[in-house]
Image: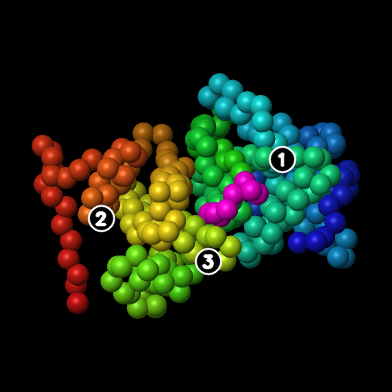
């Protein structure tokens, strides 16, 4: 996305304030009695298309944070980034390129290094875009006024050799299964399974997938972590840990007051210790019998 990024003006800020997002995304609508001062203090910029039309905006610094019930969750360090894409452009796949354009601008024009984002827990669309760009969940926080769950993410690491994305292509998924010695799955079944997952984590070196994991969730209290696989040459480098953490962080972001989740998995042989580090318990134990499964053909 090579479109120009310009300092926010009163005219552009008025356009942002007039945007209206649908359904649950209405929380991002500018309140009618809210002044435009926050957008006009020099920390906000607009992204224009080739016709000079506003397509999105960025905020850098403290205005990109939210007020939290937790004390001092941000601290010093990365530059906080907030962003908004014009409502009619949301959900069309522009999120990653829109975000990366803002990060490039902040590096080149503002001298920024690391970055930090804060995303609403329900906003799975934004979450996937951020993870696709290399961001990683740091901690969950609670909005001071609304009590809604938010997640603070940090990244990306431009020097990192491995890149983590919130997706993986079915062909790559099937190739990984074969490479780690798992049974084959038909491509159309793999595509359906990935599409039906609540969250998919992919680990890449360049454009080659070297690891994957996915999370199934019924929208209530039951979730299932599955298909955690890393190519042998890339094991013991933290890829599996990172992908499991991303899956669990996604699930934590869906938490509501009084909720809890039961997360199930079937560990591979001699892999129990790996999952115990995240808090998983072995079965059988004094409260539960052994896990069971079957192939239905």
Whether tag 2 and tag 1 are in contact, CB under 8 A, the answer is: no
Q: Helix or strand or loop: what does disc 3 sit on?
A: strand
> Dot 1 surroundings within 10 Å: few (below 14), some, or many (20 or more)?
some
Residue at mark 1: 113
Q: Alpha-carbon distance for marks 2 and 3?
A: 24 Å
User: In the current view of this chain or complex, which residue is farthest to the top?
Assistant: 71
Instruction: Give how far across and how far down residue 282 sits, in percent.
Output: 20, 43
Give me the disc on residue 268. Answer: 2
User: Number of labelled discs?
Assistant: 3
Instruction: Give how far across and how far down residue 84 sits, in percent.
Output: 70, 49
Figure coloring = rainbow
> Which range is magenta?
157-164
Mark 2 / mark 3, whichever is N-terminal: 3
- Indicate whether 128 appears above or below 62: below
User: Would you identify the image quadrant in which residue 205 lies?
Assistant: bottom right
Instruction: Give how far across and how far down residue 8 sits, in percent.
Output: 85, 44
244 left or right of 8? left
Q: Nearer the viewer, residue 265 or 147?
A: 265
> Dot 3 surroundings within 10 Å: few (below 14), some, or many (20 or more)?
few
Give me the disc on residue 208. Answer: 3
């Amino acid at each position: 996305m090579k479109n120009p990024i310009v300092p926010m003006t009163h005219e552009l800020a008025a356009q942002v304030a007039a945007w209206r997002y649908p359904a649950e995304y209405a929380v991002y609508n500018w309140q009618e009695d809210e002044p435009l001062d926050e957008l006009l203090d020099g920390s906000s910029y607009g992204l224009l298309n080739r016709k000079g039309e506003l397509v999105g905006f960025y905020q850098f610094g403290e205005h990109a944070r939210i007020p939290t019930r937790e004390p001092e969750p941000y601290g010093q360090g990365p530059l906080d980034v907030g962003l908004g894409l014009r409502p009619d452009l949301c959900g069309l796949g522009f999120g990653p390129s829109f975000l990366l354009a803002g990060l490039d601008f902040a590096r080149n024009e503002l001298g920024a290094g690391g970055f930090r984002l804060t995303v609403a827990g329900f906003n799975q669309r934004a979450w996937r875009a951020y993870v696709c760009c290399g961001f990683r969940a740091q901690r969950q926080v609670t909005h001071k006024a609304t009590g809604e769950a938010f997640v603070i993410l940090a990244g990306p690491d431009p020097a990192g050799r491995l890149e983590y994305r919130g997706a993986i292509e079915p062909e790559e998924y099937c190739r990984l299964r074969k490479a780690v010695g798992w049974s084959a799955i038909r491509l159309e079944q793999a595509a359906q399974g990935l599409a039906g997952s609540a969250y998919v984590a992919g680990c890449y070196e360049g454009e080659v997938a070297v690891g994957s994991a996915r999370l199934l969730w019924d929208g209530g209290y039951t979730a299932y972590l599955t298909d955690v696989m890393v190519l042998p040459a890339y094991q013991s480098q933290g890829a599996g840990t990172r992908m499991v953490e991303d899956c669990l962080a996604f699930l934590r972001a869906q938490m509501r007051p009084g909720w809890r989740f039961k997360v199930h998995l079937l560990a591979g042989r001699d892999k129990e210790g790996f999952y115990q580090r995240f808090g998983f318990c072995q079965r059988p134990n004094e409260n539960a019998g052994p896990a069971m499964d079957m192939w239905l053909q």
